[in-house]
Image (tube, rainbow, N blue to C red):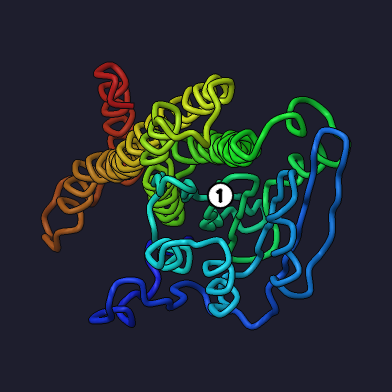
Amino acid sequence: MVRFTHRISKKAGLPPGTLIHVGDKKTEKARLRLMDYTQEHFEERDLAAIEESFSYREKDSVTWINVDGIHQVDMVEKIGRHYDLHPLVLEDILNTNQRPKMEDYENYLFLILKMITYGEAQKLLYIEQVSIIVGRGFVLSFQESEGDVFESVRERLRKGKGRIRKGGPDYLAYALMDAVVDNYFLVLEKIGEDIEELEGEVISKPVPETAESIHNLKRELLFLRKSVWPLREAVVSLEKGESPLVQERTTVYLRDVYDHTIQVVDTIETFRDMVSGMLDIYLSSLSNRMNEVMKVLTIIATLFIPLTFVAGIYGMNFKYMPELEWRYGYGLVWVVMVVIGLLMLLYFRKKKWL
């Protein structure tokens, strides 16, 4: 399962703007990728050091720098100094417990999103924080580790398809946000399949492991809601804000992202209601199974009550019992007991207890 929080206690008591990485501990070297483009020009390269990208700021083009691995605090600090980023922005980039939000710093916009992927083998959610900074002529994106949902955006940039190379950094930021939100639908589709499979199991053959699966689904949906719900506010702030960094033609596309976000939230709420209902169905199924077992045992016990009475009468050690000396007494007792049992079964069936 995903973790709701990382350790943030090590930041307690430190002044605001102190740069400490809060997240999963990593040892691999961060990867830096640069894409620089205009409508006619495109360049893509991996950077050995962040300083190699500084000269691109003087160009009349759009530069996208993607950082995979924010555990190298000194590198993030260098980027912050070169692009004049506020220390609180750098602190939020390094703290992976941030909620989705949008902040306007006049010279640049700061966005935080949650990129969610689904592991089909383990049926687990993987949540990663993505920080995006949109400035004049540049976009910076920061991820916790390598691997993302932005490959379709990169491919569009390479091939020059659509409006992406004609737009500015604001349109590139929209494309990144749209890729993240669109991936939510893929994740919800997989969760929907898990819910359908679990529904059949709950109704037909509930086992103790079923309750654990329901609990895991509830946790995943809760964390999904926590990751997606604040994104609505961020998109609205970006769309309705008065920042000169967002062109009027881009706001139309941002409204589309907002609509998709609403759809995702509605689907999550629907799934949460379904999973909550499944827990009630699970408990009802267990109760019904227990009632069926108890009914069978009660019928068996009830059938043997009169038979036990007859057997008890003839099991008494009295010398002068008339039937003891009778030649057909043993067979008659068996006939009486069988008839009593059949009559009781017919009565139970008539009352629809069977």
Q: Residue at x 40, y 67 (%)?
A: 87
Q: Position of residue 128 (x, y in %)?
A: 54, 58
Quadrant in which the C terminus appears: top left
Q: Secondary structure at mark 1?
A: strand
Q: Is residue 194 left or right of residue 352?
A: right
**What amino acid is found at the position of numbered circle 1 in the picture?**
Ile
Q: Residue at x 73, y 32 (%)?
A: 164
Q: Residue at x 70, y 46 (%)?
A: 150
Q: Residue at x 25, y 46 (%)?
A: 301
Q: Is residue 22 left or right of residue 57?
A: left
The answer to whether one can see residue 218 in this image is: no
192 or 139, nearer to the observer: 139
The answer to whether one can see residue 10 in this image is: yes
Given the current orientation, which residue lies at the most extreme top position?
A: 350
Q: Position of residue 113 (x, y in %)?
A: 49, 48
287 or 101, nearer to the observer: 101
**Residue 233 sits above or below residue 63 on the image:** above
Q: Position of residue 91 (x, y in %)?
A: 41, 68
Q: Is residue 102 left or right of residue 27?
A: left
